[in-house]
Amino acid sequence: MTTSSEILLAGIKEHDPRAIGRAISVVENNGDGAADILTFLDQERISKVMVAGITGPPGAGKSTLTSGLITILRNSGKRVGIIAVDPSSPISGGAILGDRIRMMDHALDPDVVVRSMATRGRLGGLCASAGATVRIMAAAGCELILIETVGVGQSEMDIVQLADITVMVLAPGFGDDIQAMKAGLLEVADFLVVNKSDQPGASGLLMDMEQIFSAKEEESGIARVLETIASENRGLEELLQSMENFSDYLAATGQKEQRRNRALNAETIDWIIEMLRPRFQDAMNRSPSQKDPRIRAKELISKTLRVN
Ligand SMILES: Nc1nc2c(ncn2[C@@H]2O[C@H](COP(=O)(O)OP(=O)(O)O)[C@@H](O)[C@H]2O)c(=O)[nH]1
Ligand SMILES: [Mg+2]
């Protein structure tokens, strides 16, 4: 192992913010020592961490809620990691500025590690790079890692796969967004948070969500539909407590391990594709073809990898 990787690994272990930031960058850029860092991270800390994805439509209050959760966690002396997934779309670019300003509350706190990443153009896809970032933060002693995403796209599903638990933040007045998400909601979310409970329409939304989620609540005995007013820090303690209870429940029933294994498999597949890409790109460049891509892919695989 190189001396610089050793220094970074030691820094991670001691929760040195500069070492953490540097290590994440080295891994993201696939720089010298990336493999050493990834190989020798503290696996015990990684297995204990709780990774929560915070999703939902833009404007529902995810950043406000995330910031409020950080405050509670810091007051109880816990270290926190935050990954903000930047939207690639310029349309929602404004949301990011607001997020940055909100996160400034915690900018000077060395026990809050903040990292933002773009959804496009990542080595190995979003899931892969975010996965490594999560593990470095965990190895650095972050006990809870929150991943905030924007919108409901493919990156959102990637994050859902990566996280141990998923919190969907909704708010009254997002009728169309919520209607569009309903089908997918049950599949992906562990918690539905009706934020902006101070606004008209909140109680109706809460009733709808409770109806959708009634079966899930019975399964674990933990309330999974919660009301919050993130801007007033109301309901956040209860949400965090429920998340912790649910995480314990997942661990006790073996589901946390199952979810982790599934996530690691998905990430591995991303990397397999990423690592094979140049070979296939070469093969395609060498023999241009108008063939149907599905047929061509099968032929290229059998020729390049010698399998059927
Ligand atoms: N009335 C009300 N406004 C809120 C609440 N939570 C957040 N907001 C406001 O809603 C807007 C969007 O919040 P933000 O956290 O940026 O949403 P995000 O796009 O989901 O991250 C901001 O102006 C917040 O101050 C709430 O509980 N009640
Ligand atoms: Mg936000």
Image (cartoon, helix red, strand yellow):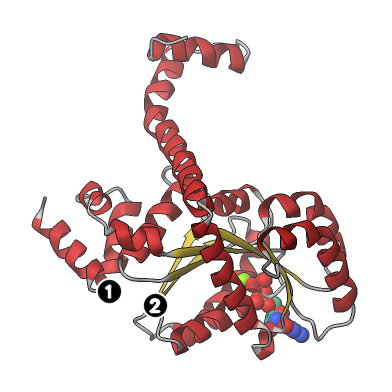
Of the four image quadrants, the one with ligand 1 is: bottom right
The reply, left or right, for residue 210 in relation to residue 224 is right
Q: Position of residue 73 (x, y in %)?
A: 48, 82
Who's the residue at 82% across and 65% down the image? 209
Do the numbered discs 1 and 2 sit on residues whose CB atoms are within 8 Å? yes
Picture disc at residue 79: 2
**The quarter of the displayed image where residue 110 is located:** bottom left
Q: Position of residue 75 (x, y in %)?
A: 46, 89
Cα distance in 3D space between marks 1 and 2: 9 Å
- Few, some or many C-alpha atoms within 10 Å of disc 2 (few <14, some 14-19, many ≥20)? many
Which residue, given by chain and number where applicable, does mark 1 sit on? 15
| Amino acid at dot 1 | His
Who's the residue at 62% across and 80% down the image? 64
Q: Secondary structure at mark 1?
A: loop
Check mark 1 vs ligand 2: CB closer than 8 Å? yes or no: no
Say if 272 sits above or below 25 in the image: above
Q: Position of residue 252 (x, y in %)?
A: 50, 59
Q: Residue reaching furthest left? A: 3
Who's the residue at 35% across and 53% down the image? 28
Q: Position of residue 208 (x, y in %)?
A: 87, 65
Q: Which one is nearer the viewer's eye here, 198 or 42?
A: 42
